[in-house]
Structure formats: C-alpha cells, structure tokens
Amino acid sequence: MKNVLEWLEATVTKHPDKIAFSDTKDSITFKDVYDIARNTGSYLIEKLGIDRSPVAVFAGRRMVTPAYFLGVVYSGRPYAPIDASLPDKRIEKILENLQPKAIVADRDSLEHVNSIVDELATNTDFSRPQVFVAEDISNMMVDSGNRSEHAQYSVNAAISRNDINTNDKLAAVRSQMSMTDPLYIIYTSGSTGNPKGVMTSHLSLMTYINAYCDVMHIEENDVLGNQSPLDYIAAIRDIYLPLKTGCSTAIIPKEYFMEPNALFDYMNDRQVSSVGWSVSAFTILSSLGAFEEVGLKSLRKICFSGSVMPCKVLRKWQDNLPEAHFVNQYGPTEATASCTYYSVDHQVEEDEVLPIGQAYDNYRVFLIDEAGKEPAVGDQGEICVCGPILALGYYNDPERTNAAFTLNPLNKAYPERMYRTGDYGKLDENGVLHFCGRMDRQIKHMGHRVELDEVEYAANMVEGVAESCVIYNKQKEVLLLFYTGDCDKRSLALALRQELPGFMVPRKIKKLEQMPKLPNGKYDMKKLEEM
C-alpha cells in the first residue's frame, strides 16, 4: 500500500460498524470516518481545486477529529493540525509560516480562529485563507436530542453531493498521489522562537506504523488509550494504528492524568489494552498514588518515550502489571515519531538506566563523532538517522531544513540524506544503543563538563522526589534544580552531595507543586527559566 487512505478503505470493508475512535461523550465507526473524510475531501476539492497546498485544521481532542484530518488527505493536501488553545502569538507564527489557502475549524474554535486570521490579515501581508466549518463541510449532523450511547450521524440531504461526481473528483486526486507526497505538517518548537513545521510523507508514516505495530503486537482487538493532543507527533499512533489494524482508540481526558482512580476506571471501562504515553504521564501517576486503590485489568502493551524513564517508576508499573510488555522508545519528530526501541525483558532495578535499544525496521541509526567519523564501540557520538522515515523537511524553511537534514559523511559512494538528532549516544559491545544526553544539555561549568541529565538522574533517585529538571543560567553561571515531591530541599541537597562532585550540585533548588509542562508532556523550559 502506498497511501494511508488505502488502510482506511481496507478496514472499513472489514469492520464498517466497529468503533474507530471514542471520547467521553461519543464514538465514531470506521464507516462514519470514511464518509466524513470523503465528504470533507470532496468539498475541499470543489472549493479549492486540485493542488498540494496545506490546510490547517483546528478541531481539538474529539473522536471526529481524525476524520477531518483524513478529509484533507482525500483532497490531495497535507493537513496541519493546530491546537486552538495555544497562545495567539504562536498560532499567528504557525499560520504565517504555513500560509494556508484554507482552514478547517470546528464550531468550538471557529470564532477564535476567525479573530486570529482577521488580525493577521489586517496587520501583516498575510493572505486571508477561506475558513470552513468542519461540521458543515463533512455533511455531519449530530442528533443532540435523546442521544443513545453513541452519537447519531446522518448526511444532510440538502447539501449532499452526487455520489458519482464525488467519486470522480476523489479518483482524479488519488490518481496523482504518490507515497512520497506530504501527509501532515506538525509544528514543534524552534530554538529561534519560531515553530518548525515538520513535513512527513505517507511513506514515512506508514513505515513507522508498520514497524511499531510489529514491535508492540497491535491487533484488531486492541483498544489504544490516547494521552497526547491530536496535533502532536505522539498521536499519530493513536490515529493511524486503527486504520491499519482495525483496532480502536479511546481519547482520554487530560484531567484524568491527575486522577489515577478516575483514569484507571475509565481505561478498565473502555478495556484499554495498549498505550503509548510520555514518561511524565507515568511519573506523575506514580507520585499521585497510582494502583493504591484501583488497578488496571486489560492493559498489556505499554510504550513510553519523550524523556528518560526513572526505573523506580517503571518498577512500580512492572510490579502492578507483571504480564505487560514494556517498550522504551526513542526518536525525534523528524524521524516520524521514533527511530529506536528497547523491549524491557526483565524486572528492572531502581538505579538502572535503560538503553534506547535498536533501530526500528526500515530505519538506520548510527553515530558520528566530532571529526565526522564513526566512533569506536563505547565511545560517544551524535545519533544520526537515515531511511525512508525521514521527514521531507521543515515547511517553508529551507535554511533550517538544510542545517538539520544533511548528507551522510560516512557514505562516500552516493548522496545519502540523514538527520542529525542533536543527541549523544554510544553503542555497547552487543550493538545496543545507549542515550547519553542532549548536545545542548552538555555544558561547561566551573571548568568542568557537566551533563544536566546526569544531575537530574541523581535527583530522581532520591527518595521523595517525583520529578526534576535542571537548567543552567549561563550568564550567572548557576545550576538550578526544580523538583516536585515530598522530599525537603535540605535533604535533597545533602543526598546530591553524596552522589555528585561539588561542581555538579545545583546552587539553587526550588520545590514546585507541579512542574510546568508542554502539551506533549515535556517540561516547559521557558517557564522554568522565568521562575
């Protein structure tokens, strides 16, 4: 198969009435997804013609949102998912970079989106795109009367289009599509303050989903528990695994991740069997007393990523889910979510550091040292990635694209494109890859090289510390440690002095009620720096 729409079309033939996506209020079947997506795609073709310009989608964490994404795909364009709750300035920067001809917005975000677009069009040279109401162009009517367990969907006959004409339009677009066409543009933070639009092809996405599916053994009877916002890279598993396998995704409310009992009750009720969550989700739930009153009955397949998993947290989950398969995943958005995995095949020790393992199928992961050569076994180098999973680049940003996506200096025979992750790693004698920290998290302090991740690891090992983050104020030459948990500052400082050289012990330690987080679960470094 060369297109994600082929996955949907094969699955809707097998399981038309099976639930594809659900949230706390409603659910939607594969047939509903198929109909809504085709209607949306046909409408966009009718209004915009046939080209490959992107369409921004504002639709929130709702069970119908993936169908809107796929509607844009049916029109032959990449979709750019954007969270309407982001700060206005960030949305403006994204839209200025994207320059979309059209925006698809649900009714909840419509007024806000229009106000941002009007402001941009008035005060800049931004060309105002057409803004379409998602519920209207998909021909979806939700019966808000005596609602049964699932929402009732029907086609609005007054605006329904001729099926033959619709098929002709969609077929004309499909005939021009290839597997290397861009599928989506997902925006990530950029060091300059301008978001980067990571553009990924059908081929790259399908390569990753196939590899992840094999490692996690995802099958049609699985139910995935979605944690990530649908505009983040981590959500692609929860969106596309159902299309490939016929499994279902249950979208979990954000607030449940601060209430372990409510979360576990919901997961048990939906029979969630597999999750792919950020490490912070596991650490927060553990610190809030997960498993003390309610257990998980159906969860058996667990993947975690985004940061280093504290093994004292993993051990708690292993003890409570002894039959579960745990996988540590590593990789950047530019390599289609992840590039390596490590299946945890043993009961971990609390002071253990997990490796990031081996490359997924169809990925090639290797190290390059500062001299542009491959380091010896055990020596450190930058983690680099090659293969069909590389992003197409950063949308409308050739300068940053050329800096991050370069030619492999180890390959002298032909030009081979690679991505430099900016992370250090090393290979052990068994060929297993170990993460050694971010290159920009390695600093010079008091004449010594300091790995900030190493300081965090030491803090996380202290009894009573739930989460920690270390930042470096270069101007003042001060290490600052922020943490949450029951441990008092004095006890933490004393414990660190027993584990670390004096120059590595943070001069300032601040206890927080809650760590500031980005929607993807990672720490909000800018907010920490402002504290």
Image (cartoon, rainbow, N blue to C red):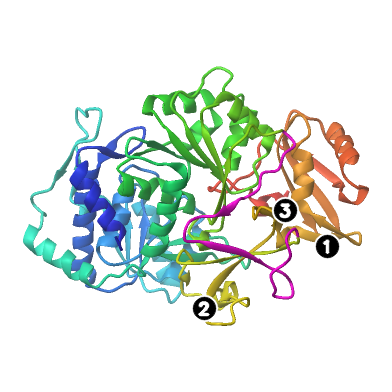
As rendered, which of 97 and 206 lies closer to the eye? Answer: 206
For mark 3, give the secondary structure: helix
* 178 with respect to 304 (left or right): left
Image quadrant where residue 253 sits: top left
Image quadrant where residue 331 sits: bottom right
Quarter holding the N terminus? bottom left
Q: Amino acid at mark 1?
A: Gln
Q: Amino acid at mark 3?
A: Glu
Q: Is residue 52 above or below residue 491?
A: below
Label 3 belongs to which residue?
529
Q: Residue at x 10, y 58 (%)?
A: 161
Residue contact at pointers 3 and 1, CB within 8 angstroms: no
Residue contact at pointers 2 and 3, CB within 8 angstroms: no
Res. 131 visible in picture: yes
Q: Position of residue 141 (x, y in %)?
A: 19, 43
**Distance Cα–Cα, label 2 vs label 1:** 32 Å
* Mark 2 crowd level (few <14, some 14–19, many ≥20, 10 Å Cα): few
Label 1 belongs to which residue?
475
Q: Earlier in the sequence, mark 3 or mark 1?
A: 1
Q: Residue at x 62, y 64 (%)?
A: 366
Q: Position of residue 60 (x, y in %)?
A: 39, 47
> Does the magenta portion include 373?
yes
Label 2 belongs to which residue?
398
- The residue at the far front in this view is 430
